[in-house]
Amino acid sequence: MNLKTAVVTGGSRGIGKAVVLALAEAGYQVAFSYVRDEAAAQAVRDDVEKMGRACFTAQCDVGDAHSITAFFAQVEQRFERIDLLVNNAGITRDGLLATLSVEAISEVIQTNLIGTLLCCRQVMPGMMRQRQGCIINLSSVAAQKPGKGQSSYAAAKGGVEALTRALAVELAPRNIRVNAVAPGIVSTDMTAALLDLHAQEVQSRLLIKRFALPADIAEAVLYLAERATYVTGEVLSVNGGLKMP
Ligand code: NAP
């Protein structure tokens, strides 16, 4: 049996971990990166291997172009081809723009936008040669309806959505689809502080009266990867009907 190979950035926790596990469950062999927590990454790798799927994990800071190149070189040594790339790694450094340091602003743009762009660039030659592939980028509701203090994050994710549409045009002739998923509020480390302080207020703005679980987002990724054969250049909102104030 020829298994498909997926690469997921930031697979050690949160949405990325759920995506890794869902893809393995669906039959993919998976390579994923982590940046800080090697033990957490190894635990995810063990879970994937228990499902009988090959798994590779290595450190990669998507804010650093050299780190990205080194990571994909290792992935290509381990797996013959890459069928799916999920650009999940992302960070927030929220705050009113006037109060944010230049470093914080750059880090958000570099990690969320430039990191995504450079990871796409790494997998494109192989996918173009094999005339088959799929790229899924993690955007955010903030790209279209940002909250206060989200200027750099919203700009980065807006860029991710524009990149998704642009690459869909560039890669369609080679049978490569490019889409994005835009989550609303998902229970992960990223939103823990927000939900500690404002859970009730945020919940009042949802049509579906619960916060998303990482698995809800993984389902959308799986849909775009496996079922959405005629969908490209789209952003799929997965936000429980969140209304921004
Ligand atoms: P999270 O719980 O904070 O996890 C972030 C993941 O990204 C971790 O695996 C982390 O690795 C990795 N990461 C962070 N900086 C990185 C870097 N410089 N290089 C490589 N990997 C890096 O976040 P999450 O909530 O799962 O979010 C995942 C994606 O969904 C992000 O793109 C985020 O913007 C987007 N999103 C999330 C929400 C939400 O409500 N949670 C809503 C909309 C969009 P380590 O574990 O090694 O630190």
Image: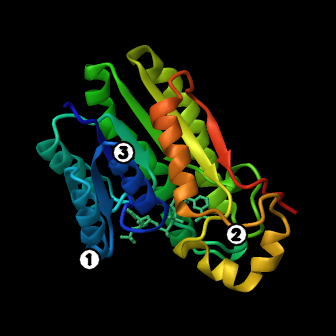
* Residue drawn at point x = 53 percent, y = 75 percent: 189
Q: Quadrant of the N terminus?
A: top left
Which amino acid, mark 3? Cys
Q: Position of residue 228 (x, y in %)?
A: 53, 29
Residue to which mark 1 is pinned: 39
Residue at the far right: name it: 245
Which amino acid, mark 1? Ala
Counting other residues with Cα less than 10 Å from the Cα at mark 3, is it few (<14), some (14-19), or many (20 or more)? many
Say if 98 sits above or below 226 in the image.
below
Q: Position of residue 148 (x, y in %)?
A: 77, 68
Residue 50: which quarter of the image? Answer: bottom left
Counting other residues with Cα less than 10 Å from the Cα at mark 2, is it few (<14), some (14-19), or many (20 or more)? some
Answer with left or right where residue 239 lies relative to residue 156.
Answer: right
Answer with left or right where residue 172 lies relative to residue 182.
Answer: left
> Tag on residue 97?
2
Q: Does any atom of ligand 1 lie closer than 8 Å to the CB of label 2?
A: no
The Cα–Cα distance between marks 3 and 1, rounded to whole angstroms, is 24 Å
Q: Nearer the viewer, mark 2 or mark 1?
A: 1
Say if 225 sits above or below 193 in the image.
above
Q: Position of residue 171 (x, y in %)?
A: 44, 23
Earlier in the chain: of badge 3 and badge 1, it is 1
Q: Nearer the viewer, mark 2 or mark 3?
A: 3
Task: Label 1: state its secondary structure.
Answer: helix
Answer with left or right where residue 9 lies relative to residue 78.
Answer: right
Residue to which mark 3 is pinned: 119
Earlier in the chain: of badge 2 and badge 1, it is 1
Which amino acid, mark 2? Leu
Seen from the viewer's position, the closer of residues 229 and 89 is 229
The Cα–Cα distance between marks 2 and 3, rounded to whole angstroms, is 27 Å
Q: Position of residue 49 (x, y in %)?
A: 21, 58
Q: Is residue 89 visible?
A: no
